[in-house]
Amino acid sequence: MKLIERIKNMIATPKTEWQTINTEPETLPSVLSTYVLPLALAGAVAIFIGYSFIGMDYGFFRMRGMEWGIKMALLRFISALIVVILTTYILDALAPSFSSEKNIDKSAQLVAYSCTPAFAGTLLSIIPSLAWLGGVFGLYGFYLMYLGLGLLKKTPEDKKVIYLVVTIVVMIILYALVGVVLGMVMRTNLNALNNAAN
């Protein structure tokens, strides 16, 4: 129940929720296990259902079936975990450059809870043609991160925007790189399984 409450509060009353989060003695592993992992898993299940049973057309190309469902769900689940972890470490490493406090646990809270709209938006992938709406909703997470920077990372007001911009650029690059690498790995593994089956 706490998970649902946290999601609701992060989206509806983020300023108040950041104050609550700032008092919680969480660590990177605890944030990953109690928040990121369940939400990433829920999104992966939605994607699996969406691509396995509903699918999506790209011109003459149809993405549908169990193989697509498994591939897309794994891609989203693994990339979400990797990007949250890597962004946490990079955000923390950059902290002194923006007169901010270096604290890996606060960085983990900031990154994980700022991703709430993106995690929630992924649930729309249960109907793949609506997935883009989830992506748009995910942009709200950047505003959440902006609100949390001053409180969790002690970032001065005049450094918040540039710190946020650098973090956004890092996240975009990480998502692209992780997506490409995981896509290649999964394509190779699926081809190997198909060849073994034949």
Image: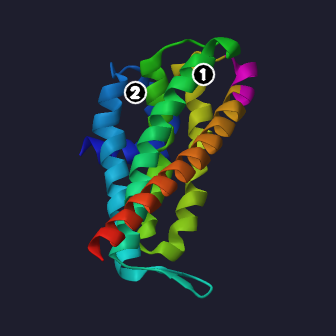
- What residue does disc 1 label? 150
Query: Can residue 50 be seen from the camera position used here?
Result: no
Scheme by which the image is coloured: rainbow
Q: Residue at 74% x, 28% y: name it.
A: 162
Where is residue 186 shown, x and y percent of the image?
43, 58
162 and 172: which is toward the camera:
172
Where is residue 92 shown, x and y percent of the image?
54, 20
Quote the CA–CA distance across marks 2 and 1.
Answer: 14 Å
178 and 54: which is toward the camera:
178
What quarter of the picture does the C terminus occupy?
bottom left
Left or right: 151 as drawn, with respect to 192: right
Secondary structure mainly formed by the magenta segment: helix
Q: What element carries label 1?
A: helix
Q: Residue at 58% x, 15% y: name it.
A: 154
Q: Residue at 56% x, 39% y: name it.
A: 144
Tell me which segment is drawn in magenta: 156-162
